[in-house]
Amino acid sequence: MSETPQNHPASASERVVPDADLRSIDAWWRAANYLSVGQIYLLDDPLLRRPLVPEDVKPRLLGHWGTTPGLNFLYAHLNRVIRDRALSSIFVTGPGHGGPGMVANTYLDGTYSEVYPRITRDEDGVRALFRQFSFPGGIPSHVAPETPGSIHEGGELGYSLSHAFGAAFDNPELVVTCVVGDGEAETGPAATGWHSNKFLDPVQDGTVLPILHLNGYKIANPTVLARIPERRLVELFRGYGYTPYVFTAGFDGEDPISIHRRFSALLESVFDEIARIRADARAGRYHSDDPVTATPEWPMIILRTPKGWTGPHEVDGVLVEGTYRAHQVPLASARDTPEHLRILEEWMRRYRPEELFDDAGAPSASIDRLAPQGELRMSANPVANGGLLRTPLSLPDFRDFAVDVPSPGATTAEATRVLGTWLAEVIRRNPSTFRIFGPDETASNRLAPPVYEATQKQWAAAILPTDDHLARVGRVMEMLSEHQCQGWLEGYLLTGRHGLFTCYEAFIHIVDSMFNQHAKWLKVTRRIPWRRPISSLNYLLTSHVWRQDHNGFSHQDPGFIDHVVNKSAEVVRVYLPFDANTLLSTYDHCLRSVDYVNVVVAGKQPAANWLTMDEAVDHCTRGLGILEWAGTEMTGQDPDVVLAAAGDIPTLEVLAAAQILREALPDLRVRVVNVVDLMRLQSESEHPHGLPDREFDAIFTVDRPVVFAYHGYPWLIHRLAYKRHGHDNLHVRGYKENGTTTTPFDMVMLNHLDRYQLAIDAIDRVPGLAQRCAGLRQELQDARLRARAYTREHGEDIPEVADWSWSGAR
Amino acid sequence: MSETPQNHPASASERVVPDADLRSIDAWWRAANYLSVGQIYLLDDPLLRRPLVPEDVKPRLLGHWGTTPGLNFLYAHLNRVIRDRALSSIFVTGPGHGGPGMVANTYLDGTYSEVYPRITRDEDGVRALFRQFSFPGGIPSHVAPETPGSIHEGGELGYSLSHAFGAAFDNPELVVTCVVGDGEAETGPAATGWHSNKFLDPVQDGTVLPILHLNGYKIANPTVLARIPERRLVELFRGYGYTPYVFTAGFDGEDPISIHRRFSALLESVFDEIARIRADARAGRYHSDDPVTATPEWPMIILRTPKGWTGPHEVDGVLVEGTYRAHQVPLASARDTPEHLRILEEWMRRYRPEELFDDAGAPSASIDRLAPQGELRMSANPVANGGLLRTPLSLPDFRDFAVDVPSPGATTAEATRVLGTWLAEVIRRNPSTFRIFGPDETASNRLAPPVYEATQKQWAAAILPTDDHLARVGRVMEMLSEHQCQGWLEGYLLTGRHGLFTCYEAFIHIVDSMFNQHAKWLKVTRRIPWRRPISSLNYLLTSHVWRQDHNGFSHQDPGFIDHVVNKSAEVVRVYLPFDANTLLSTYDHCLRSVDYVNVVVAGKQPAANWLTMDEAVDHCTRGLGILEWAGTEMTGQDPDVVLAAAGDIPTLEVLAAAQILREALPDLRVRVVNVVDLMRLQSESEHPHGLPDREFDAIFTVDRPVVFAYHGYPWLIHRLAYKRHGHDNLHVRGYKENGTTTTPFDMVMLNHLDRYQLAIDAIDRVPGLAQRCAGLRQELQDARLRARAYTREHGEDIPEVADWSWSGAR
């Protein structure tokens, strides 16, 4: 690269970091690097008390060296800053595959041995530390839930910034250092994650210090940002609204102490600047009415170093340090090739372990003096083990927000709007621990207007007088990026707070992969005693498949549920409340729960209310139940047919079908069942919510036909119920990937989920009935065709559907 | 905003656009706006030949106005440029919900009536055009497959740039104009999509002209990029490597002709600049060895206009034009409120329809003269109906690349590497119509080294002498963004070319949502006669769940298959070839197919070869089959138990289990079945590949226990086979979300998919067998425990597993 790097800020800090500190930083860095290499390679001789022999080396060499020395460098320097300034800080490791580094640092500062007493601070402990890494029965190779101080797995690249900002919201004293690898920087979520600064309030929220680590390479390629002109790189981050500082080291043989002196001076400046911005903000110097001064231009650092810095420069005649070849394990056959073993030993001895560990094998005093104390250690900061800080929400009684239901279907409501009235009160009672995240859909999903009576949308860029509900601080976070919503919320929950993500149902698939990682995180943390439970991740999916009136086919996908149920049953819950009161009852439950992912799918359109609040609570507590008022049950007798539903639109159609059947065939015993908690359908053995077989059979029968109208893809019901006795009698209707921009009733007709079809299905499945009432069956077929013709002619639902209301008694 | 906009490039073009053209542009713009409003609102009186009455207005008003006038403005101006320069150009509409605009433009240029003769170019045609929009039986509200000239649905926001660049690759004469909405610009895929310029070769590829349309608002919020200081906005796009031009209009009452004059002058400059860059590139003036001059700094335009430009300024006392309230339908009750009806009519008359349409209702001559001719119309460019241009690949005979298999398991290979040798030859034979896309994983997934003997990785940024396989042009596209890989490939396929996307299995979930949209696109296009078939979208998923040796739990997720099978059966195919020859045969089939999404999951690690090429072809043609050499069949007799497998690791374990059983229980009749084409398990009625019941029963029996070892989540097999006669006898093992960084055999043990467990499962399910051979069963249990203990002690697989090889005869 031919350009002159901008290597430090214009005005260097006055504060001079003493040489003793620089030497401690260097010792820490060498020790962390040493321990990282040891984890990747060694089974024995952990402190090189004798020459290495092949048997000291692990038979399978697994892990990622390339990113690790840069992470260790930063961790060492941040320790010094935290110690000197008594900062509360956590470290988010975007290049999370640099797991050995984070383990090494948390071992050096003592936290690792505190949470894993087996890993002692002596030679045996170092041996155990090395052995367990990427070893069966040991620890994963990444920065994982097992790693103290981590809130970010780092296996999937992309959203470290989103996690970091989520952690910073409502944590005014916190500084989150977030390392973004230059590989990760190419991902979409990272590329938009930089814009989080337009959503962070410099008074009520904390600070994120992003550090882009340009080590130049990914697995097998250079990185984009390492190969563009440096002036463009700087413009890019100025464009993102930061003040970037480029720091380059490791390419020219500069003495490490000199590098440390330069970098610690830079950090002093940067942390001074952070303090100045925060003071300016408290003094009211950022003005929303002026785009130029609305958003603080926080500092960020671009750290350019070789990949695999300090590692083997060349192996087998090819360059390793400073190339992509340093990504994983630079010496692939250290156990089997004497030359590799020699290079390994030479490499590790270059860190001078004899200076770093005392005779017993504990870290030296020079290292110890660098570590912050107690909870100021980044690895021990309770923010990174959010369950320690979490307090339950103060929840208003949701019963007070009930809609009045004098009889089933007698009143109507927009369910999510009703939920919004309750959420507004949740916000009032929890002014700094609860947030709602959404990709510009809070209003469209009709939590607004109610929630905007209690709060605003937080927005740290310019605000115009014509804007509605935008403010410097607020509980609603809206950015048109599902990745950001998910990442922010995860960061917020992982640090001990509460929230929900409201999203169009179809587009929640954008974060399928992020959901996967969070569900995996929760599963693992349940087995880590020192990780305390965190609030559940709550989804509110609306604007769902059946009511995409404006948008049509591209917006129709109910498959997130299918995706979710693949994850560990102890972690996932799926609810389909079918009216306003069941939604209130469901969400109250969700906001109280911990360590789950709760998926709630609900309607936003005006729709009938079916259950009183008492009934709703009862129904939701059981998770499913018979709607006795809707069927034609005879006490003590099994029904002839069961009409079951899950979801608001399917329930509506089932109720209408039941009414058709009751009026036309009063002697037919029809049972109507609604399922709110989808996991009740699974066996007890497969899911903790699974209904015992006896109870399941009592509701669905073991031998009567069950016509099941389901909100989503029909086969999921088969999958959930396949171990049930009556599953051969189960006939499921659902979304069959048929749709366009059309009327709501045309949508259910296109997918054979409409009332006429359901009534026909019931008739066809009760033995002998189709023959006995062929005329009725034909009438229902005709009604379907008439409905279709009408809707195509008039562009609206047929009056008898649009105006249908329940005429049964409770 | 208080800043001075940079309203035009420094050096304006010499060319002056004649006033007659400016008037035509204005007429076109007004006509397109008029037709857009008409589509949203009107049932009748399409040309306002009389005053509007309520019955002229649709009962349900659906659609999106806000973005539409800006799109129409651009379309009109581009027509002029294309006509004057005889450019080949297509238009990618990021804000694809502006569907009425694109329909209007393609109606004005005549294409719409050519492909839909029912929509004539007269008053009746305009009426039909209006009526069908967002109407049952009509067309969707978005820019959809039904829209001529579209390759981008636009329902899901985020990857218009990826599509645009994908279209431009290997289309040197093409200019793709890509409008990115400022809402879309907040998404992750868009934020990284700008970096596509580092992957485009200015000689062999075409040009993308991005236009960021800053209309300032999303659904209910301002946009981030509209509210940052303009100098930062400009820096951002300079940082992305473009030369940005800001053009502002519509805020100050400027005369439309003046606006058109300014914008057409800007376009002249921009297209001159594009021509200059292309000429410079052909003259070799971009140098990979210099980061400053490696990448052309292509022009891009930032168009700042009011949202809902030219629409109602104020409705019901609140501002609409220039606010988020213009997003969908500005007049919500035009049918029911006289005041709204009045505003609607006034709004439409402001476009002066009497000047725009002749007496018959056809577009006026002033409009006609603006349209490019024939295939130069953006709506009729065959590039946007890629099937018209597609020619089948020239495929080398995959049989020539077969691995030698003297007997089952006698040789080993890395399946993907073998595939790579064939793909290298595919690349040689198809030097400009085939590309491989991957997120920095082509080498890791072991298509390399072979493919790099035939090609390079295309890279338009700086290249260092130490780099491997990077070049200005090449057939492999690697960026660490699954979104970009998917989007580029889709754009490439939609414009008539071929390719594949190779990805780690777990992280393909990152594009779940994009896959959804593409599958929906394919489903719809199958019903549009003028859309010609395009090449299938081929995934190669490897580095799969069972062999995440380096990465562990975060990298383990085989659920993409579950996600895929929710989409229309006519579109999706899933293959699990279990060795090198079956992978070759499968992929040959995939690269020949059209209009599918083919998901292929295959191993990359050294593994046994099981089938000769002849056997592989036969097996893959059937999609599944009995491996007679592996079982202990007796001719004419049903087996006692069926061991079935899908996937390489499950097949290995099933074969080993079969060997254990054969040796221990030589009289037990064991059948071994392998499934390559997963869709064969479904009924004929559910999937075109579904095996007829009789054939299914002949293989799996109707009453014998089937122990099925499956690559992914086990319940999928139940779901696919639930209608089969023997499904109650099906016992499936698969990935149960148990994993970490551990040995390969520990992984199968953790999930009970190991050979010992499968043998035990078989014993437990054959009636009476468990009692008869309790000792053997205990031995197998002990072997499992020994294996676990060994792997935890030694960190590697037990020798009898690691060294296991098939000892049966063929």
Image (cartoon, coloured by chain):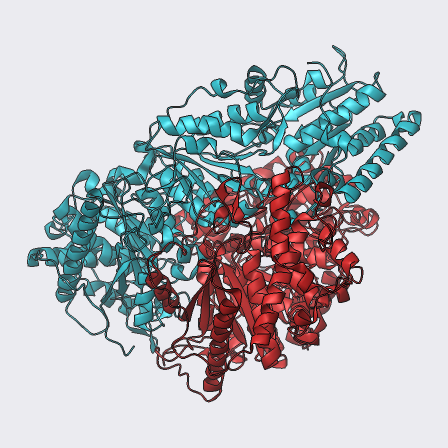
Chain colours: A cyan, B red
Residue at the image point whose x is 59% and y is 39% from the top: B777
Residue B285: x and y in percent read 42, 86
Depth check: B6 or A58 in front? B6
In this rendering, the answer to whether A194 lies above or below A663 is below
Q: Is residue A23 left or right of residue A756?
A: left
User: Is residue B493 found left or right of A92 in the rendered image?
Assistant: right
The one nearer the camera, B480 or B339, is: B339
Q: Quadrant of residue A492?
A: top left
Asked whether A321 or A758 is in front, the reply is: A758
Q: Position of residue B670 (x, y in %)?
A: 71, 48
| Quarter of the N terminus of chain A within the rendering | bottom left
On the rendered image, what quadrant is the C terminus of chain A found in? Answer: top right
Residue B533 place in picture, x, y as percent: 72, 66
In the picture as drawn, the residue positioned furthest to the bottom comes out as B283
Q: How many marks?
A: 0
Q: Is residue A201 above or below residue A427?
A: below
**Rendered position, A548 above or below B528:** above
Relative to B258, A230 lies left or right: left
Residue closer to the observer: B376 or A438 = B376
Q: Position of residue B564 (x, y in %)?
A: 63, 51
User: Is residue B150 among the parts visible in the rendering?
Assistant: yes
Furthest toward the top, the residue is A635
In this view of the protein, can residue B651 be seen by the observer? no
